[in-house]
Image (cartoon, rainbow, N blue to C red):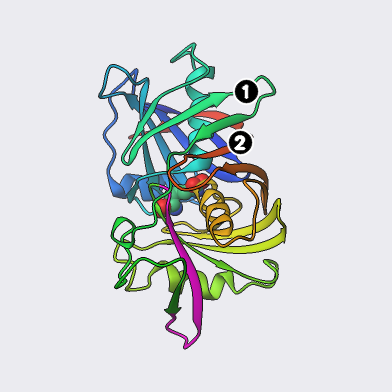
């Protein structure tokens, strides 16, 4: 029987199937990804993470990310921490600080002595064309008219992948399942978007839920946490270092302002190792 080894991991409940494309070349197709991503018929994951050799000799690895609907995406924050833990624990590197290529530039994960992983997630971008988002001019927030007649005020942030973040009074009662899909598929986001719902607790603490593009609401979204903190800092609600409470646990995010990278620190968990049957 032909098999493929994989590792199941999660970061705050945002769960991943990780494949080693360094020791063996791996070709993936969307149909296969959708099957493996289905927890009834396959392994089940929010995203699949593929570790590959770097293109450039100065870098350590290439990091490719696929949503459970089979689409390839640019960035995944919780995945970046799991990626760093995976390559170290599987003996693909002895380095604890890495330079990793993604579809949208370099990220730099670092394994901390206490088991946490910190990642330099790169510099956030706000230009509408970069998300992409249809707008006449760049602004701090934008009114977004939804299909159900409601209008919400969103900040747009690219962390490599696109995010639309709105402030809500209470994430527990926020209309995530109703508005999430409407925002995700809004025509002003031609490549769709991740929809964040942010509750400010105080200047150093927020609560966050994210309806992820192509994956639905997840227990946590790392890039969503970065985007929400950046949006909150730009609007004067938050300090530079913020703890983000997600449904899956806590992330620490730090951003010193425009032109600076966003730093994310959080945990990783290896759940099990498995063998996929390819026959
Ligand atoms: N879970 C992620 C983001 C994964 C990609 C996202 N669904 C997209 O389509 O952009 C994270 O932790 O950042």
Per the rendered image, the range of residues in magenta is: 145-159
On-image quarter of the C terminus: top left
Between residue 121 and residue 268, name the one nearer to us. 121
**Is the shortest distance between ligand 1 and the CB of mark 2 under 8 Å?**
no
User: In terms of image quadrants, where is residue 247?
Assistant: bottom right
User: In terms of image quadrants, where is residue 133?
Assistant: bottom left
Note whether 49 is above or below 214 in the view shown: above
User: In terms of image quadrants, where is residue 183?
Assistant: bottom left
| Contact check, label 1 and label 2, Cβ < 8 Å | yes
Mark 1 vs mark 2, CA separation in Å: 9 Å
Looking at the rendered structure, the number of numbered marks drawn on it comes to 2
Note whether 201 is above or below 93 in the view shown: below
The answer to whether residue 154 is magenta is yes
Horizontally, residue 102 falls left or right of residue 141, namely left
| Residue marked by disc 2 | 265
| Residue marked by disc 1 | 112
């Amino acid at each position: 029987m032909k098999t493929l080894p994989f590792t199941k991991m999660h970061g705050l409940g945002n769960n991943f199937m990780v494949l080693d494309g360094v020791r063996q070349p791996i070709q993936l197709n969307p149909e296969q990804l959708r099957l493996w991503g289905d927890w009834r018929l396959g392994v089940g994951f929010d995203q699949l993470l593929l570790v590959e050799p770097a293109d450039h000799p100065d870098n350590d690895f290439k990091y490719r990310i696929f949503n459970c609907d089979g689409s390839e995406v640019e960035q995944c924050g919780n995945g970046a921490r799991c990626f760093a833990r995976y390559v170290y624990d599987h003996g693909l590197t002895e380095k604890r600080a890495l330079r990793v290529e993604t579809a949208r530039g370099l990220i730099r994960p670092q394994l901390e002595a206490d088991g946490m992983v910190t990642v330099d997630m790169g510099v956030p971008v706000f230009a509408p064309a970069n998300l992409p988002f249809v707008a006449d001019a760049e602004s701090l927030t934008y009114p977004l008219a939804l299909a159900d007649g409601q209008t919400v005020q969103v900040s747009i942030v690219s962390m490599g992948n696109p995010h639309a973040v709105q402030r809500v009074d209470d994430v527990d009662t926020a209309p995530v399942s109703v508005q999430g899909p409407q925002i995700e598929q809004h025509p002003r986001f031609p490549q769709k978007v991740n929809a964040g719902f942010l509750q400010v607790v105080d200047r150093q603490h927020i609560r966050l839920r994210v309806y992820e593009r192509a994956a639905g609401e997840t227990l946590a979204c790392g890039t969503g946490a970065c985007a929400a903190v950046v949006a909150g800092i730009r609007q004067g609600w938050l300090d530079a270092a913020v703890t983000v409470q997600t449904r899956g646990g806590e992330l620490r995010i730090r951003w010193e302002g425009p032109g600076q990278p966003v730093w994310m620190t959080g945990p990783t968990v290896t759940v099990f190792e498995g063998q996929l049957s390819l026959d």
